Amino acid sequence: MKFSVALPSAYEGLGYPIGMMRDPAAIARLARAAESFGYAVVWANDHLSTPHFLRGAGDRPLFYEPLVTLAHLAAVTERIGLGTAVLALPLRDPVLLAKQLATLDVLSRGRLVAGVGLGAYPEELADARPDLAGRRAERFEEMLGALRMLLDDGGGTYRGRTVRFADVELAPAALQRPLPMYIGGHGTAAIARAARWGQGWMPGWRPLAELRERIAVLRERLASAGRDPHAVAIAPELSATIARRHEDAVARYESSRFVRHRHARDRTGRDPSAMTAANLVGSADAIRDRVAALAEAGVDHCAALAFPAESVDELIEQWQLFAEEVCRSTSV
């Protein structure tokens, strides 16, 4: 089982206080701490524009662009993977994005993992690309196909309804072939996309029984497509809080701004009351039991773990305690 952590580089106002990342040096400090604790990947989230519900309430939240952020971190770390969780793919230009991804993979010596998704907020696409408003899913599908062509073949011609380019050639090529692309999303459409184009599937938290069922569907789709049923890593994005006493961790988690935001803004149809049980919250023993159950269900990677915190120091303390009590003592 792999464990990795989400950077708070694009979460201010969503799960962390506005101003927490005002000092940009904190980003490198966090990445180096995650590397020293043995985490597999640090992940950067993506928001091009300030979400509407965070506007007009004081200071603007800071959302650092993920690919530039990871390029910076490639120069100040040695081993840890560098991931996007997730890039809002419909907002991006496919040729430029393929060039950026391949370059970042080369500069990081093959450490990039490209997590991609629809984007959390439809209004972000409507604001930035009004010509594509209402066409997120179509754009996402075409972007996936175009990126695989550009990254795997080094270029080509693509003529879709929302993505079009002709006779493109890109170099340098990514060091990793194929470049790992993790497909975000919970539903059957995301599973189908992961089976067709992905090297990983990144759902959000789900009740365990539902997650197990969807993993089985993914395995079946992979086999039907002629791929190895285990060719796609199962890497759910989870949240976590650890404390010496189980009840202290639960209280801390459930009172956090991270959980309050999820309860207020979650559009996936998930039951908010199941959130604590479905994530990695509690004492070390309770979390290890949960990790064992996830592994039994087919999870390979507890990815982009988001720990509620009110400061960079508090976040590092949570990362360290989790690494010492869970990561290093989990044998699954």
Image: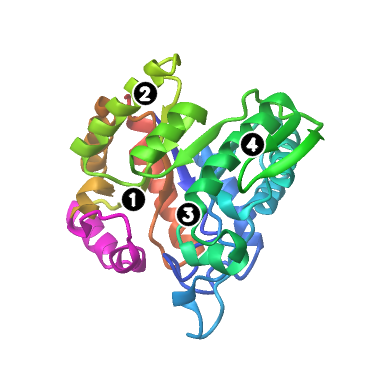
For mark 3, what is the residue?
A: 316
Q: Quadrant of residue 75?
A: top right
Marks 4 and 2, the one that precedes in the sequence: 4
Asked if residue 264 lies in the magenta stretch, the reply is yes
Horizontal side of 102 relative to 34 (left or right) equals right
Where is residue 236 shown, x and y percent of the image?
Answer: 37, 40
Where is residue 96 shown, x and y percent of the image?
Answer: 74, 46
Residue shown at the point (71%, 26%) measured from the top left? 175
| Cα separation between marks 1 and 4 | 32 Å
Under circle 1, the secondary element is strand
Residue 151 seen by the camera: yes
For mark 4, what is the residue?
A: 147
For mark 1, what is the residue?
A: 240
| Cα separation between marks 3 and 4 | 35 Å
Horizontal side of 201 relative to 114 (left or right) equals left
Q: Which amino acid type is shown beneath numbered disc 3?
A: Ile
Where is residue 45 shown, x and y percent of the image?
Answer: 53, 54
Q: Which residues are magenta?
A: 246-273
Q: Determine which of the numbered discs, if any, sits on residue 221 in the image.
A: 2
Image height check: is 20 above or below 189? below
